[in-house]
Image (cartoon, rainbow, N blue to C red):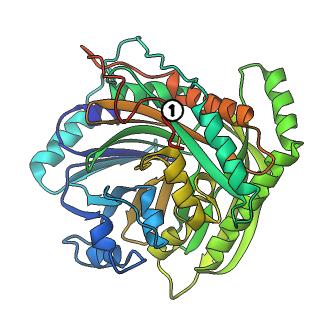
Amino acid sequence: MARLARSGLFAQYAVYENGPEWAFAGGTLAELRLDRDALRGTRDLSAVEEWLASLPVSDYRVYGWAAFELGAALAGVDPGDEGLLHLAVPVGEVRTDGGTVLVRAVDDGRLERLVHLVRTPGDPTGASADRVAPVLDDTGGYRDAVAAVLTHLHGPGPLEKVILSRRVAVPVPLDLTATYVAGRRANTPARSFLLDLGGVHAAGFSPETVAEVTADRRVLSRPLAGTRARTGSPAEDARLRADLLGDPKEIHEHAVSVKLALEDLAAVCDETYVAEYLTVQQRGTVQHLASTVVGLLREDRTPWQAFAALFPAVTATGIPKAPAYPLIRRLEGRPRGLYAGAVLTYDACGTLDAALVLRTVFQRDGRCWLQAGAGIVRQSRPEREHEETREKLRSVADHLVPAAEAAKIPSRGEVASDTVAR
């Protein structure tokens, strides 16, 4: 898949890993872009349903992304001027489950070139062994912002939890394809993706899904909340795992997240239940408390309505979500964009899979950055929440491959590390 991305055959592409299946989608046969103006006057994704009904093909798969601010728009909160949703039907596509390979394209020429690329062995990246080492610490801004959140949580308002994130600048341009390959070899994600789509350039190793809709109309979400590091020492990791499972703060943070995920499901499902509760999942340099919530989609509801009900993930927003949006925007000082949004696929048969965009590196307009957050509840301590972001950042930061002839990116500007508005 990395060689397909690097081939230059398509101006836009997406690579998406979902369990045993890997998919590459190249080019754009049809696309939908939604922003604030396109959603004005509505708080649903009916525009997506209308677009799908108009597609010139029937056996399609859609690839795309949703910005974090789409959730604000659906909640009636001003999302700002950035793009909110980008969906595309590809011109060419390759899928493999490790046993068989499906290759399809809109014309014979592209089909032949894709088949040739699939059959040709070779180095998937051509990457050097060099790595970039960004500075993961801040100068206190994030800790101060956590303290500000705690003031809100102890006040009279409805907030129980807020996920607050920080950016870390990467000082040179990256080879995102090589970074994706290196990072995937070292990580244990629930999903992974590599994007050059709709102006978004990113490589990510998602620890959880926001929403999954199956062919039999089951809706699943897999919230992760509660974190400890993974050190590489089995004995130390076991100790940290036991500490995680016995920490009242982490268990409370997880429990309230599962409760809200069930409430979100109940808006579109006839029945809901918790299939797994308080297990531990290993994700790269960290381990998380994990649960799975499931619902049966009502007959009068669609997969896109299920996605809208669950998006953004409760583990990347706050409880309740609506009052968390303006506080997050004020303290973080900028739109999140793809961070804490979703990369997703949707098939004509009604299946949907949406990965939460965490553990991701972003590149745009000559700037490159990482981003990570932590769930703040009343029992949180600023120093520990800062350390948690460092633990998460290392899942990606240890595998950044510089672009050839990399030019220094100015350290001033939008992506300066840990600039927090107060």
Q: Which residue is the extreme one toward the front?
A: 422
Query: Which residue is depicted at the point 74% across and 33% down?
Result: 384
Quarter of the image where one finds residue 309: bottom right
Query: Which residue is depicted at the point 30% across and 25% down?
Result: 121
Q: Above or below — where is 225 with respect to 123?
A: below
Image coordinates of residue 27 in percent, x first then y, are 20, 50
Relative to 138, 116 lies left or right? left
- Describe the element under mark 1 as helix, strand or loop: loop
Relative to 154, 344 lies left or right? left
Residue 104 visible in the picture: yes
Quarter of the image where one finds residue 262: bottom right
In the image, 41 versus 103, the foreground residue is: 41
Q: Above or below — where is 74 with respect to 208?
A: below
Q: Above or below — where is 382 with respect to 266?
A: above
Image coordinates of residue 416 in percent, x first then y, are 42, 30
Relative to 112, 195 lies left or right? right
Q: Residues within 10 Å of mark 1 (few under 14, many from 20)?
A: many
Q: Amino acid at mark 1?
A: Asp
Relative to 297, 404 lies left or right? left
In the image, 242 versus 115, the foreground residue is: 242
Residue 101 visible in the picture: no
Image coordinates of residue 26 in percent, x first then y, are 24, 47
Image coordinates of residue 154 in percent, x first then y, are 77, 56
Figure quadrant of the C terminus = top right
Q: Which residue position holds label 1? A: 418
